[in-house]
Amino acid sequence: MDRCVRDVGAPLVSTGSMKRVLSLSTLYPNAARPRFGTFVARSLEALAAHGDWDVTVINPIGVPPVLFGEYTALANAAVDGEEHGVHVHRPTFTLLPKIGGRLNPSMIARSVLPLAKRLHAERPFDVVDAQFFYPDGPAAATIAEALGLPLSIKARGADIHFWGAKPYANRAMRSASAQAGGLLAVCEALADDMAGIGLPREKITIHYTGLDRDKFRPLNHTKLRDRLSDELGLPLSGDAPILATVGALIERKGQAFVIEALATIPGAQLLLVGKGEDEASLRALAKEHGVADRVHFLGLLDHDLLPLVLSAADAMVLPSASEGLANAWVEALACGTPLVITDAGGARELVTDEAAGRIVERNAGAIASAIRAVLADPPDRQATVAMAEPFDWRVNGAKLGEYYDALVAAHRT
């Protein structure tokens, strides 16, 4: 069942004495973007499944005053419903594409606050949570203050590295963090980066990502190439190495370096999973380097196909300029596929042994050398899988509940 289909006729029943969180998240799947922010949804669903917390999400969707392009589909995706145990509301707010970053927190708060007040009056919340530091954090701060509730804000990577470098956003983030009872970071390295832009390090708790262990596990290599060839229409027969890169097609993720590296690795096939504004330039680059027939743009894959791609790959290569702790890293390891990644975010918290892969400089030569090293001496698959052992959505949900418990208790004292 699609996550964004309304559960018609299923009222949101009172949960009695359960604690309640109101989570504000611009990063959340909807019918127009079903893969957008799935990691946020998984975490909050895991919290709801744990049984101690009732979870309500407000997923504000930004649309311009005049709809065009993808914004028409986004406006149509502003549908409320109960999705996998989470109550989801999708109000729209006025968005000025490319130029409205400074205004987004106030526009979100203006749209969301009446809804938040109504929901709080019907069944009071215990805590307000933001799942991305900007624009979500400052908007959630306005809501928490209006409701008289404790505030939590989570940082994930780009919110700190991109928005934190903009003076107007940095000021708003610092103000929100001063109000917050607690902050979350997806890894220790990101917590240090948060402190580096002026956020209070003493308030930060590390909250690692989770993993769907039923989906992401080593699959049978002997038949994967044939299956992928059939399902994706790709020429993957034979013994040629397969490389996978999972991430939005944007400069920060570094797919251009992987394509340049591919040109020095004869016969290897590159599977690019993701969509983004750099697709045309990446296609042109592949043609320029004579590897267009070996670079396959797979788009936004269904999550059931991603484990097949990762299990079939000999390495998952992602030379990001910045990260928090990428879910794609963990998912690849869980499929038994070693990483070739840059020293970004929590990379050193994950790649602690060559069983997990290699950390390299962000240039095509270093990437190609690391790929050749992994191909020449691949780690034991089970040893690679073991590197993902600490990650589990159930653990993630339980830890999140414990963190909220402490936040609420501190607020009441």
Image (cartoon, rainbow, N blue to C red):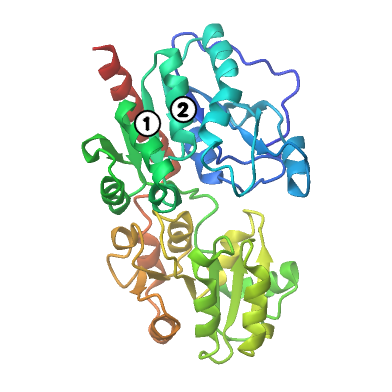
Question: What residue lies at 45% left-to-right and 15% top-to-bottom?
Answer: 146
Q: Position of residue 275 (x, y in %)?
A: 64, 61
Q: Amino acid at mark 1?
A: Ala
Mark 1 neighbour class, 10 Å CA radius: few under 14, some 14 to 19, many 20 or more: many
Q: How many marks?
A: 2
Front residue (pair 94, 248): 94
Lateral position of residue 228 relative to residue 21, left or right: right
Lateral position of residue 277 relative to residue 332, left or right: right
- Which circle marks residue 140 in the picture? 2
Lateral position of residue 231 relative to residue 114, left or right: right
Q: Is residue 292 above or below residue 281?
A: below
Occupied quadrant, residue 287: bottom right
Q: Is residue 267 above or below residue 164?
A: below
Query: Does the image show residue 236?
Result: no
Occupied quadrant, residue 333: bottom left
Front residue (pair 117, 338): 117
Question: What residue lies at 40% left-to-right and 75% top-to-bottom?
Answer: 362
Identify the residue position indicated by label 1 in the image: 176
Looking at the rendered structure, the secondary structure element under dot 1 is: helix
Q: Amino acid at mark 2?
A: Ala
User: Which of pointers 1 and 2 lies earlier in the amino acid sequence?
Assistant: 2
Q: Position of residue 122 (x, y in %)?
A: 56, 7
Marks 1 and 2 close (CB-CB < 8 Å): yes
Looking at the rendered structure, the secondary structure element under dot 2 is: helix
